Image: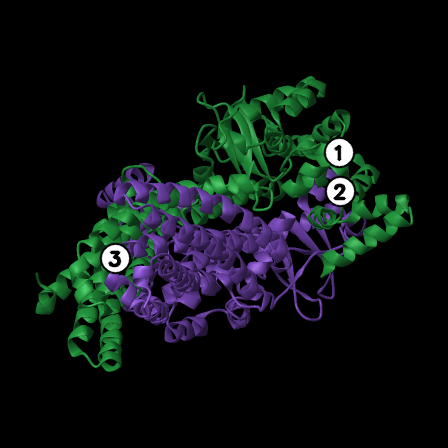
Chain colours: A purple, B green
Amino acid sequence: MEIEELVQQLQQLLEAKEYRKLRELTEDMQPADLAEAMEEMDVQQRLLLFRLMKKEVAAEIFAWLGQEARGELIEKFSDTELTAALEEMALDDAADILEEMPASVVKRVLAKSSKKTRDSLNRLLNYPADSAGSIMTPEYIRLRKDMTVTQALDVIRREGENSETVYTLYVTERNKLLGVVSARDLLLAGPDQTMEELMDDNVISVQVTDDKEEVANELNRYGFIAMPVVDSEGMLVGIVTVDDATDVLIEEATEDFERMAAMQPSEDSYFATSVFKHARNRIPWLLVLMLSATFTGMILTHYEAAFAAMPLLVSFIPMLMDTGGNCGNQSSTLMIRGMALGEIEPKDILRVVWKEFRVALLVGVVLAVVNGVRIWIMYGDFMIGVLIAVTLLAAVVIAKLIGCMLPLGVQKVGLDPALIASPFITTLVDACVITVYFTIAVQMFSALQG
Amino acid sequence: MEIEELVQQLQQLLEAKEYRKLRELTEDMQPADLAEAMEEMDVQQRLLLFRLMKKEVAAEIFAWLGQEARGELIEKFSDTELTAALEEMALDDAADILEEMPASVVKRVLAKSSKKTRDSLNRLLNYPADSAGSIMTPEYIRLRKDMTVTQALDVIRREGENSETVYTLYVTERNKLLGVVSARDLLLAGPDQTMEELMDDNVISVQVTDDKEEVANELNRYGFIAMPVVDSEGMLVGIVTVDDATDVLIEEATEDFERMAAMQPSEDSYFATSVFKHARNRIPWLLVLMLSATFTGMILTHYEAAFAAMPLLVSFIPMLMDTGGNCGNQSSTLMIRGMALGEIEPKDILRVVWKEFRVALLVGVVLAVVNGVRIWIMYGDFMIGVLIAVTLLAAVVIAKLIGCMLPLGVQKVGLDPALIASPFITTLVDACVITVYFTIAVQMFSALQG
């Protein structure tokens, strides 16, 4: 792998004390590669390398590092060093990193920062953790509507270094957002055209308090490079860029994966989360589900007489329960993901139920026939084959209907379907399947009655 | 909702035959909004509106429409109309749409296209479905290394209209990729600087045959707006842009969701997939899992004598199996997602096992105590409480170890962990839990022996 080679190269230069060469090398590298290589080094080497780099490079790399590797560096840093790095960084990255740090350190670091940086960071840190404000940056380029293309290009030349993007530019009047001009428009236009002529005044923007996932979805939906963020009075307060929006989408998918596996989502990466926190994220849902599975167990005790008379019945329970659970999960996963992507909405419920019902019949018949025949042959008992086949068909239909309706219903009342649906569906389906199974069994086998 | 208002507005204008107004209105709108509104209309209205729009707008909207709505339009189109729309569109979008259509239609449409479009489309259509080639576009801006900034800006002005992006520009010599220049560099540079001075010649690029998910991950990792794609001889053949890469990442997450829920991923959206196809995607894994759950059932028949003597034991089976399955899924989900995001690698296995083992002990002890005590109180039987507590602790540890090791092992040998892990883990864990449960039960209760 390339990264391993890079690590070796850096370590050799460090050992040979080729500090000037290191400084030059790190300047030419892609920050993503350099950060990944530094994550592989031990913290002493990382610290040394960090101190050797040009300060702009160091600040950029600091933001690119994984949370675990950065945390180790922060512990070794002096407050002055940390403040210097944060001053050099993009403001949104600095705010994100401050959020990872203990409150006492944040306070000390902010106290040492310049007033301008401190004010901007404080403002960013004050937005709720899930809001557009928490992922936006206040570093963008503002133009006036009477500026010409030539003047606008001058502004870009002057302020471009410190702006998150120079590809989308915002036309404002006393902070009010009037329109958007793209660098593409500027490059394709004549030098004397004004921003007023070029700008798109049909501006799409989001509120600073909007949920960050919605903002990321919107940005992605429109195919924008950046989305302007305004406050309740329509004043432009920042922009969200496509890379940060993509990170949000990836993060939200991860949270859905975790919720669907009955966990509280972790804020941090797997290794950066402590054993204790991992346990705390996993226990609550396990307890809830365990108690609800007890309910299925109680239904079973109801049929004690039946399986005492015919113990073979018990051996089919795992297969029936698992199949029901799997069928339910298939449907609920399609619903939850479809809703997250905006392809399915609660109002589609009838269409969905009709579709899932037909799918369930097809799937149910295939499973019923395959298994009924297999059991008939294996146990030489036609009636048991029929019992299992009929139960399976019913189980698949019930599971798929619950699996599609529950997530849509949960979404409809404003709850998170990923949180509720997947784990509960298994439990609900289990209870139904067991009831159906023994009800049919008792009907079919007179020996079980009484 | 805004979209509903938009639909109403468009429908009113259509009914009032205000065709000129519609033409103007559609030109000013965001394509994403217009496409969504058109999806809500019936196909006749959609077709009428489509024919009223300026042809550039119509072509763009055509690419933005959802697959279902577009499919309905295609059925109504004449070949000439379809060809005209494809000619106007970005080449990568045109290729994607052709891939949705029946082969016979594709052949007719290509036959009617201009030679240049046909050649480009044929080349794009020939790349494997999962390759970088399948998501790239050949429409980008190429510069020569001796060009000055002024000359480069002229090229952008000339070719920008037909290029996917003007923000990343490629310096080539006889098609060989020499370096990359960003529009930002051009805007911040002096007019006489040459591309050779400005370009970054340490170019990151991908191969046209590389897997599209890897390409999307790389682009995202580097924070690029576009990634150059080269062939085996280092010739630049196209670029992948950030919006297409984001779509790939979202699509791959969806496929992982589907695989983890024991389904074959669908190429199309939920509603665009037929009932028959849905069933076909879901049946195979259900069958495999059902047969493997039968294995658990066979282990159960082994203990028939035990639960015939003590039927209460059966009622704890669902709770033990579900808890084991849930614990295993928690761990495997964290592994699979962590690997997809590059946070966890197979070589981390020892670290992971050690972490999961400690988490399992914590979780197991909590679940064991809560349930042991509950059962002791509910059934007034201390020994049953101990049996369930000990089994639970063992189940959690076994489930978490299987749940973390299996996905890493599967990845290590080059298989897809999402495909194998989740469904199999439940089955494997079930079998282990049942065995542990009855083994301990038989040891503890002498009545069950013999």
Q: How far separated are the C-alphas under marks 3 and 2?
A: 52 Å
Residue A26 appears anywhere in the view: no
Residue hosting label 3: B399
Q: Earlier in the sequence, mark 3 or mark 2?
A: 2
Q: Secondary structure at mark 3?
A: helix
Instruction: Estimate the x, y position of residue A271 in percent, counting from the top left.
Output: 30, 58
- Mark 1 and mark 2 residues within 8 Å of each other at the beta carbon: yes
Residue hosting label 1: B76
Instruction: Estimate the x, y position of residue A107 in percent, counting from the top left.
Output: 42, 75
The part of the image, by quadrant, that contains residue A266 is: bottom left
Amino acid carrying label 2: it is: Val
The part of the image, by quadrant, that contains residue A431 is: bottom left
Number of residues whose C-alpha sits closer than 10 Å to that of mark 2, classed few (under 14), some (14–19) or many (20 or more): some
Amino acid carrying label 1: it is: Lys
Could you tell me which chain the residue with mark 3 belongs to?
A: B
Residue hosting label 2: B43
